[in-house]
Amino acid sequence: MSVSLEPVREQVPLRAAAEGRRRPVRGQAAPTARRWARGWRYVILTLLSVVFLFPFFWIVSTALQTPAESVALPLTWWPRVPQLGNLTAPYSLMPFGGMLLRSVIIVVAATIGAVASAAVCAYGFGRIKFWGRDFWFMVVLSTLMLPYIVTFIPVYIVMKDVGWLDTLWPLIVPAWFGGGPFNIFLIRQFMRGIPLELEEAARVDGASTFRTFRSVMLPVLKPVLAVAAWYQAFASWGDLLGPLVYLTPESKWTYTEGLYQFGATTTANYLIPYEMSLALVAMIPLLIAFFMLQGKLIQGVNINSGIR
Amino acid sequence: MATVVLRQAEARHRRRRRLSKDERRRLREGYLFITPVLLGLVIWVFGPMLLSLFYSFTAYNVLQPPKWVGLANYQSLLNNQTFLHSFSITIIYAAISVPVSLALGLAIAVLLNRPGKSVRFYRTIFYIPSVIPIVAGTELWTTMLAASRYGVVNYILLRLGLISHPFPFFNSPNTAMFSLLLMVFWGSAGGSMIIWLAALQSVPSDLLEAARVDGAGVLRRFWSVVTPLITPTIFFNLVLGMIAALQTFATNYVIGGDTGSPLGSLDFVNIFIYREAFGNFNMGYASAAAWLMFLVILVLTLLIFRTSRRWVFYVGGDR
């Protein structure tokens, strides 16, 4: 969760902003010192990139090695024959198919609930003026600072009393109540950048508030809803503590829990390619979603954004 | 819940003056729209908080009803060496990981803050580790940091002759925290880089221009012009980062299980609470530990807020 409190203005980098306009233009080559500085910058950035990307190279390489290659010295940098079969081989050791299915159900159901309810609440906080609104908004925001572990134990006991242990409900239902303070905040901020006139037209035509929200506001919110969906899906997909506590038998595990258990119970070195292929599969949907949403996500949370 | 609040609000208003038709409509609709989160606050936040406060004064193993023990849980926790150890290493971890990852992000952002297309390219590269799910990322790192020559990091370091014996990484209590930090920096530097980039780009160019004309060098401009303008960002991310770091669970659980191996060196507070609650079913004891942690976070947050008046600078007041 990266939050920037700054409005993103035009992309005017520091140095260029300070010097760009004033640099003498007439055929003067950049001083050698500056060219050197620029060169070093790229050397450092490239070296850093290699460090940051190496783990991705390594997981792909290891995931495609034969068990024999993975335990041989010198280490294998790239498998002689990439073992695509490694992607499905672990399924014979643990029921990962069912785990994937449960994970997908949880992610979809929790994400829909979080986005829908966060959008509704954000509209209440952002567009309707009523007594007590700001107070409740502050209360909602202050729960950002509450450590989850304080509420986790009693919620577990309630879930147990309701008979929801070993069901998917505990991992889905809580998301339907506003989708978390952060998502409400995010959507409300985005809404504030949208001109009021947009809704007034609908209002004049006699549309109800809910109608206005649904047919005028929701379509405009699409970009920020995508970001909120991303945060919820990321959290649900990667959650370990929830499944660990709520889904105990192997037949109920989620993919993330199965991945953890596989790593924890199979200590044999030659199974590392399988573990890495499972971990790779856990990363892939998020990487795909990230590349689709990159433009929106990487701006951080741009608090002053809106329709531009 | 919402209807009760609504009625109270309406009653209170009626005492003062009659609400106009429009005001009443907005009151009704406003609370209707925020009903999901108000219900959520009661069911998932305030209700459970009160329950957990109650449990913290009881002995409760789930099978038998809770038995009131007064402050015994708290007294026992404050004398429990394991808990105090968990507590201190969690604080140390937060105190190192949050500022260092902010600083790393800043360093990368300053290197990147140039015009041109390459910025986007590098920005993506540094950000990608932030979108990796924790369990998968941690298993990848424990594989790479294996404490023998089969671990690729050790393999490279040995081949380069930088070490003569494999570095123990997650195998030794002396190096486990360091290794965890390495992994966490990889995953978090990109996130803070994004924040810094946005902040740096929000600094008005005319201010920098003015400082430059007055003869301020690069460092001077950074410290005296840019830094004050981005303190709200630093502040906000310091608070949220600290709260998140103090609640670290999944990384440590994947590396060291519910004992925080090796030898308890990764036994952070949330691992301790998890073990007490779901390993030993000491719900009362675990709730007391959770409340202690909550109080510490509250105090630390208030402290940061208090000192913030001295170092956080808001342009033009409230937005």
Image: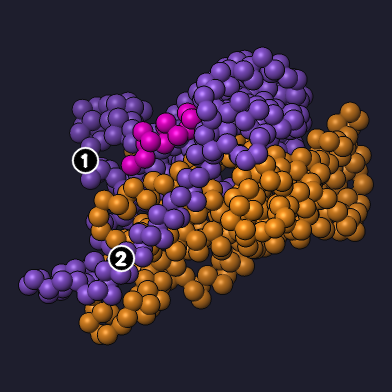
Chain colours: A purple, B orange
Q: Report whether mark 1 lies on the same chain as mark 2.
A: yes
**Majority SS type along the magenta span:** helix
Residue type at mark 1: give it: Glu
Q: Mark 2 sits on what residue?
A: A38
Seen as rendered, the residue at the extreme left is: A26
Q: Is residue A231 above or below residue B226?
A: above
Q: Mark 1 sits on what residue?
A: A197
| Towards the viewer: A284 or B96 | A284
Which of labels 1 and 2 is toward the front?
Answer: 2
Look at the image and tell me in which quarter the N terminus of chain B lies. top right
Which of the 4 quarters of the picture holds residue B133?
top right
Structural crowding at the residue carrying mark 1, measured as other residues with C-alpha within 10 Å and reported as few (<14), some (14–19) or many (≥20): few
Q: Could you tell me which residue is drawn at 82 percent across and 58 percent down?
A: B84
Magenta region: which residues?
A282-295
| Towards the viewer: B146 or A230 | B146
| Towards the viewer: B272 or B186 | B186
Pointer 1 or 2: first along the chain: 2
| Towards the viewer: A46 or A246 | A46
Residue B314, percent from left and from top: 40, 68
Viewer can see residue A151: no
Callout 1: helix, strand or loop? helix
Report whether B36 appears left or right of B167: left
Q: Could you tell me which residue is drawn at 39 percent across and 46 percent down?
A: B124
Residue A271, percent from left and from top: 68, 27
Is A20 colored magenta in this rendering? Answer: no
Q: Could you tell me which residue is drawn at 46 percent across and 50 percent down?
A: A50
